[in-house]
Image: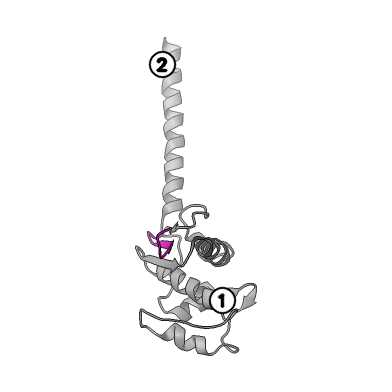
Amino acid sequence: MVLADRWSKSHQRLASKELAGIKKAIKEKNSTKSLPVLPKNYLEWISKARPIVDGKPRDFVATPFWVDIYNDTFSFKMIVGGRQIYKSTYITDVLACEATSAPGVQVCYVTFDQPSQNSFSKQRLQIETFSQNSLLSKFPRSKLGNISEMSLRNSSTIYCTTDNNE
């Protein structure tokens, strides 16, 4: 009986120590102290958080009209343009900047159908914006993959949905 009590106390001590270590690791992982402080201005955010897209340094030499669009503070913008003029890059920049530069923010991307939602959320937002960026990859709370919601460690959330709630 004495041996069982000694083993039980020893086991409880070891288990408590291990649980404390696990709790500490989880707390540190979810802590916002390790997150970088990012500017709220879109162009400053780009230079600090996302200076490279698709392996190329960013500049606005070939597309100077984007500078005015990024600097426009109006909340409702309509951008009409052809293919490959960086519309998706702009949208991911705005969503990521708003969600990473301030804690507790909720932003939403709304598109017309499920395939568009899937490709934008997975490829443009999760992979190209967060996964492939060493600075921004610190923000997602858990592994990426959910196409409709991305929870960040600073308590911000990025939602992706369709206009008919699919």
- The residue type indicated by label 1 comes to Pro
Q: Which mark is residue 5?
A: 2
Q: Position of residue 113 (x, y in %)?
A: 48, 64
Q: Which mark is residue 51?
A: 1
Left or right: where 79 falls relative to 119: left
Which quarter shows the N terminus? top left
Which quarter shows the C terminus? bottom left
> Sequence order check: which comes first, mark 1 or mark 2?
2
Residue 28 versus residue 22 in the image, above or below = below
Q: Identify the image quadrant of residue 63.
A: bottom right
The residue under the point 41% across, 33% down is: 16
**Which residue range is magenta in the image?**
154-166
Q: Is residue 161 a member of the stretch shown in magenta?
A: yes
Tell me the element at label 1: loop
Q: Is residue 110 a member of the stretch shown in magenta?
A: no
The residue under the point 45% across, 58% down is: 148
Left or right: where 106 falls relative to 131: left
The residue under the point 45% across, 79% down is: 42
